Each structure stands twice: as structure tokens, then as C-alpha cells.
Image (cartoon, grey):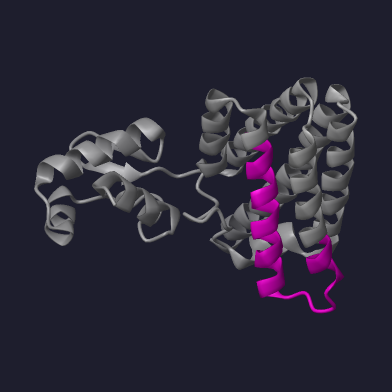
Amino acid sequence: MSVAETLRNRIFDGIFAPGSHLMEITLANELGVSRTPVRGAMARLADEGLLVYVPNKGFQVRRFNAKDVFDAFSVRANLEAMACRLIAEHGLEREAHECLQGMLDAQRAVLKEKQWDDDRALCWHDLNLAFHHKLMTLADNRWLTEAVHRARQLPIIFDSNLRPHNREASMLLYRREQALLAFEDHTRLVEALGRCDAAEAEAIMREHITSNRDLLVLHLRKNADRTRTLA
């Protein structure tokens, strides 16, 4: 793993908290490298938006707020909606359609289980993520895929495995009721793709992501208000 990848994962996983300063010499000694690759890695992460350079202080982990989350999810909603439009316009091949149906079967099986706890929620998360990744693969547009990946990673509300940092946020997004609604969206989306209905597929995906956006942003804003009240 490169120095940049190591530092990036530590930021996503919360080892380096928002606002914390990264010490070049300390990191070089810890990673067993010279200061040059560490300096280069931090400059790269600054270009990615994960770090900011503060004059006379060096690099620090960028802080993000609810507006950043709203904006990032809004971009992602339109990008993934575009991906679905492309799939429908190109036509969904039989093998791809069967693959998506198999993913829906796996999601349905998880939702039918009687117990719904953190493990089930994370299992749903992984199946949901795989479904979205498959759609990006089917869209077959490298630039679009890279843009979606960036929108997923920033702001930093998910770890290096794209799982929510906060347990409360995780259960908010992946509680059974919310998962059932998402599954309904997935089902309608696959049906629209099967019909090559580009407009319908695009609209379903856009609404699908913006609904999660609104839930998460409301949660973040309430937490921010609560924090200010306690302060």
C-alpha cells in the first residue's frame, strides 16, 4: 500500500480526526520512509479535498458540514441517475439483467430474516453497495464512475469500506423500514432498465439517492444543533 493510500484510509477510518494536523516527520518515521513521499502524499490528498494546507502549520484534515453532505449527495444523485439512463439507452443484456435479479434475490432474503440488528444492517449495506457498483459497471463510462467514486468518498461520512462512521447514522440509513423502501426502488429500477425506459430509470435513481440524502442531512443538522445547545 502506498503512503497516500495509507494516509487516505486513516482519514476515512477516523484515525486522523477532522481538523487534526499531520506531522510530516512523525509520519515518515512511523511509516519507515523519508519525508519526501509523505510530503508528496499529503499534497495529493490535498488535491483530492481530504486535506487543506494552513500556512506556517502544514496540512490538516478537512472539516465537513451538513451542507457539504447535501451537495455531495446531490451531485451523486444526478451522476448515478445518468448512469441508469445510459444503461437503459444502451439496452440491458440478458446476462446483466439476470445478474441484477440475482442481487435483488439476495437483498430480499436479508430483508425477510426475522432479526434485524447491526449485523443485518451492515449486510444490507454491503448488498446495496454491490448493487450500485454493478450499475456503474454496466454504464461503462470511466469518467462517470470516477466522479461517482469521488462524490461517495467526500465529505468524510463513510470509512474506507464506505460504511457510516456513526452507528446512529448507520441504523438511520439501514434500518429495516428504510431498507425495504430502498429495495422497492431497486426493484422498480431493474424493471425500468429491463423495459429500456431511460427516463423512468433516471428518475427512480435520482429520487432513491436524494431520499437518503435528506434523511442523513436532517440527522447531521439535528446533531449540530444539539452540540451547539450543549456548548
Q: Is residue 215 above or below residue 40?
A: below
Q: Is residue 119 magenta?
A: yes
Furthest toward the top, the residue is 89
Whole-percent x and y of residue 44? 30, 34
Please state if 11 lies on the left or on the right of 41 as rendered: right
Q: Residue at x 65, y 65 (%)?
A: 122
- Taking 112 as reference, is 163 left or right? left
Magenta region's main secondary structure?
A: helix
Which residue is drawn at the image coordinates 78% and 67% (left, top)? Answer: 110
Q: Foreground residue, 29 or 134?
A: 134
Per the rendered image, the range of residues in magenta is: 108-136
Residue 109, compared with residue 9, is above or below; it is: below
Which residue reaches farthest bottom? 115
Q: Position of residue 67 (x, y in %)?
A: 61, 37
Nearer-the-camera pick, 122 or 165: 122
Q: Position of residue 84 (x, y in %)?
A: 75, 30
Question: In percent of the image, x 83 and y 23: which residue is there?
Answer: 198
Query: Is 149 placed above or below 104 here?
Result: above
Relative to the observer, which residue lies in front, 182 or 25? 182
Q: Quadrant of residue 170?
A: bottom right
In the shown orientation, is residue 198 left or right of residue 135?
right
Classify 177 as above or below 41: below
Q: Is residue 128 magenta?
A: yes
